[in-house]
């Protein structure tokens, strides 16, 4: 870590792990890659965390919300409110990236609960002010919904404890997918001062979930294991660029209660053309990951999902 704990606390860029469970809203582009569902299941099973709501992003937000609905139903967590987010980017442009391959998991609409609210912002306005200064927004897709909250409902955004995200790649100067999918949204979030931790692409890449892990889930036969294997089998049909799932989205969730698993560098970002994240001295600081104890975090993940 580049910051001693007291200095980090003074800067407000550590989670308050003494006030557990940490309340989170999970904002996800679930349905394309598999790591969103893995990270959500992890969060639901951690006693240190309380998932207060789930919202969706990256176009096809209704399909992604339908997957969330079925997943919550299968896990017996229909008490958790969820809503689709904005189908358009923060600047109003249309967004289409990749098909929602896992949508068949959702099954018929009549067999699963409908969204709690018509739209994510309504859910944010309901949940965040009810727990002022307590709720973290965990953004593991494009930052669209967070940016719209900050821009259109700043009084509600100010009542967040903070935002953590999976996104950005300040080392290699390439555009990471979540930032690239809505650069205008990322610019709003990075300028807001609300971002406290970013799990960067180069660091998250170190967290793999190879086939023996999937086999363990399959053998576990638990509701979590069955749901994740069902989603994984749909994901495997289409994906062909990775040797195994990379569990990107686990990182910001884990940081909220186990920040010691990460090394970080305090920096701010500006968003350059195409969604490249560039360190900038005049941007509000947050903790950007520079390393992760991948062995310990992988063990924590598998213990949590299979116990
Ligand atoms: Ca994601």
Image (tube, rainbow, N blue to C red):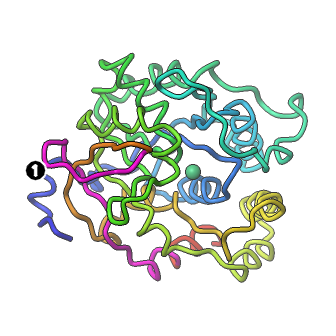
> Which is nearer the eye, 189 or 169?
169
* Residue located at (52% from left, 18% from top): 122
Instruction: Determine if the magenta segment contains residue 282.
Output: yes
> Which is nearer the eye, 242 or 116?
242
Residue tagged by mark 1?
10
Give residue 290's position: percent from left, percent from top.
31, 69
Lateral position of residue 142 relative to residue 20, left or right:
right
Q: Residues within 10 Å of mark 1 (few under 14, many from 20)?
A: few
Helix, strand or loop for disc 1: helix
Quarter location, residue 148: top left
Is the residue 143 above or below the residue 31 in the image? above
* Residue located at (16% from left, 69% from top): 2
Is the residue 253 above or below the residue 99 in the image? below
Q: Is mark 1 within 8 Å of ligand 1?
A: no
Lateral position of residue 102 relative to residue 3, left or right:
right
Lateral position of residue 16 relative to residue 221, left or right:
left
> Which is nearer the eye, 241 or 160?
241
State which region is magenta.
275-298
* Residue located at (52% from left, 21% from top): 92
* Residue located at (40% from left, 54% from top): 168
Give residue 277's position: percent from left, percent from top.
34, 51
Give residue 202's position: percent from left, percent from top.
42, 68
Lateral position of residue 107 relative to residue 41, left or right:
right
Which quarter of the rendered picture does the C terminus lie within?
Answer: bottom right
Give residue 33's position: percent from left, percent from top.
66, 56
Instruction: Determine if the magenta segment contains residue 146.
Output: no
Is the residue 188 above or below the residue 178 in the image? above
Quarter location, residue 256: bottom left
């Amino acid at each position: 870590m580049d910051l001693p704990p007291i200095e980090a606390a003074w800067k407000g860029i550590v989670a308050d792990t003494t006030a557990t469970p940490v309340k989170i809203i999970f904002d996800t582009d679930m349905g394309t890659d598999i790591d969103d569902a893995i990270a959500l299941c992890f969060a639901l099973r951690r006693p240190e965390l309380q998932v207060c709501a789930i919202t969706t992003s990256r176009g096809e937000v209704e399909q992604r919300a339908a997957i969330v609905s079925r997943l919550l139903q299968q896990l017996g967590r229909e008490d958790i409110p969820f809503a689709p987010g904005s189908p358009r980017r923060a600047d109003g442009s249309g967004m289409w990236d990749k098909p929602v391959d896992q949508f068949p998991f959702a099954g018929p609409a009549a067999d699963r609960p409908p969204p709690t609210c018509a739209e994510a912002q309504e859910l944010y306005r309901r949940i965040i002010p009810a727990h002022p200064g307590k709720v973290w927004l965990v953004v593991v897709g494009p930052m669209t919904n967070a940016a719209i909250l900050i821009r259109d409902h700043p009084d509600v955004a100010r009542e967040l404890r903070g935002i953590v995200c999976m996104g950005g790649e300040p080392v290699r100067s390439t555009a990471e997918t979540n930032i690239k999918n809505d650069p205008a949204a990322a610019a709003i979030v990075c300028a807001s001062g609300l971002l406290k931790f970013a799990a960067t692409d180069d660091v998250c890449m170190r967290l793999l979930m190879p086939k023996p892990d999937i086999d363990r889930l399959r053998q576990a036969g638990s509701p979590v294991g069955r749901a994740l294997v069902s989603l994984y089998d749909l994901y495997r049909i289409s994906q062909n660029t990775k040797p195994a799932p990379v569990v990107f989205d686990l990182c910001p969730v884990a940081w909220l209660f186990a920040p010691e698993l990460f090394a970080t560098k305090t920096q701010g970002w500006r968003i350059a053309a195409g969604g490249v994240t560039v360190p900038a001295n005049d941007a509000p600081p947050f903790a950007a990951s520079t390393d992760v104890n991948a062995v310990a975090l992988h063990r924590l993940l598998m213990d949590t999902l299979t116990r």
